Amino acid sequence: ELLARSLSHNPGNEHVRLINQALVLCADHELNASALACRIAASCDASLFSCLLSALGTFSGNLHGSASRRTEDIVSGSMAFDAVEDWLKHYLAEHESVAGFGTELYHEGDPRARLMLTSALAVNQTDASLLRLKAIVDVVQKELGLAPNLDVGLAAISYALALPPGSGSTIFAVS
């Protein structure tokens, strides 16, 4: 509830429920880089604060904590194109991979992303960015065979609840 209030001016029960769901799903994945860094520091008998600093230091890296923000950026960038397929062709001409897609840990796709996307769409079926994100998910799966990962789920929750940009990273860091 406290996090929902810090991210949204007047959070309702749905805000609290979805943010709580995202916190649990993010925390449930104990093998991410920041959690591992925290565990390593703890195994060396570091103080609680040092363990948290290890986790947050790792989280601040471009390949970890900012990934959901990059997913938001692809959605924003795709809005300049009428068709998601056209956007994907243009995007792949400049980038090697699509932010928010693929993972080595889940061969069938990240189940957390599926649940968050489904939950987000159940709450809000009118947000243009959320609908575009869903269209991107469908096209990337069809064209590239890649399933969304946690970062797509966090972006979906952020769009569904009209949270400020970058809120997915905040939720992940708190988890």
Image: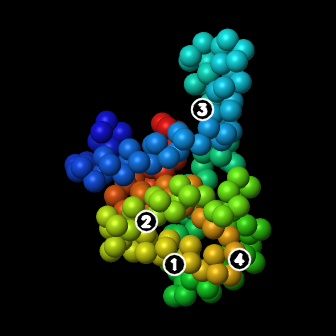
Label 3 Cα neighbours within 10 Å, binned few <14 / some 14-19 / many ≥20: some
Label 3 with label 4: CB-CB less than 8 Å: no
Front: mark 4 or 2: 2
Which comes before the other along the chain, label 1 or label 3?
A: 3
| Residue drawn at x 49%, y 38% as measured from the top left | 175
Question: Distance of mark 1 from mark 3, alpha carbons?
Answer: 32 Å
The residue lying toward the viewer, choosing from 104 and 167, is 104
Q: Identify which amino acid the numbered label 4 is placed on.
A: Leu
Q: Is residue 170 left or right of residue 35?
A: left
Which comes before the other along the chain, label 4 or label 1?
A: 1
Q: Identify which amino acid the numbered label 2 is placed on.
A: Thr
Q: Which residue matches tag 4?
A: 144
Q: Identify which amino acid the numbered label 1 is placed on.
A: Ala
Q: Which residue matches tag 1?
A: 135
Question: Distance of mark 1 from mark 2, alpha carbons?
Answer: 13 Å
Q: Identify which amino acid the numbered label 3 is placed on.
A: Leu
Which comes before the other along the chain, label 2 or label 3?
A: 3
Disc 2 on helix, strand or loop? Answer: helix
Question: Residue 120 lies in what quarter of the image?
Answer: bottom left
Q: Is residue 24 left or right of residue 89?
A: left
Q: Is residue 22 left or right of residue 29?
A: left
Residue 17 higher or lower than 162, as above or below: above
Which comes before the other along the chain, label 3 or label 4?
A: 3
Q: Is residue 53 left or right of residue 114?
A: right
Question: Distance of mark 2 from mark 3, alpha carbons?
Answer: 29 Å
Q: Which residue matches tag 3?
A: 56
Label 1 Cα neighbours within 10 Å, binned few <14 / some 14-19 / many ≥20: some
